[in-house]
Amino acid sequence: MLLRLDPSVYEALARWASDELRSANAQIEFLLRRALSEAGRLPGGVKPIPRRGRPPAAKEPSEE
């Protein structure tokens, strides 16, 4: 999908994304989801944004 943005808007978005440790693409999705949710327009079947980065450490089985 092609998205045309004013260059200064993109730069501000990229800085904001960097501050929150997201890519510009992930920041756009985050903001769109938040706006849709606040407007009551987020579809019910939408899954949460997957966590990125290192997966959590596996728990060791407890000894009995």
Image: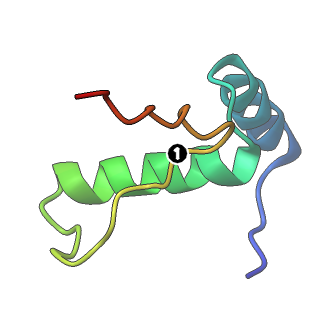
Question: What colour scheme was applied to this rendering of the protein?
Answer: rainbow
Q: Residue furthest right?
A: 7
**Image point (74%, 70%), residue name:** 3
**Image point (43%, 33%), residue name:** 59
In the image, residue 48 sits, relative to residue 9, either above or below, namely below
Mark 1: which secondary structure? loop
Q: Position of residue 56 (x, y in %)?
A: 53, 34
> Considering the image in quadrants, where does the C terminus appear?
top left
Q: Quadrant of residue 5?
A: bottom right
Q: Position of residue 53 (x, y in %)?
A: 68, 39
Q: Nearer the viewer, residue 58 or 62?
A: 62
**Image point (31%, 27%), residue name:** 63
Q: Quadrant of residue 7?
A: top right
Left or right of 41: which side holds 3?
right
Left or right of 16: which side holds 62?
left
Q: Residue furthest top?
A: 19
Q: Which residue is mark 1?
A: 51
Left or right of 28: which side holds 37?
left
Q: Quadrant of residue 57?
A: top right
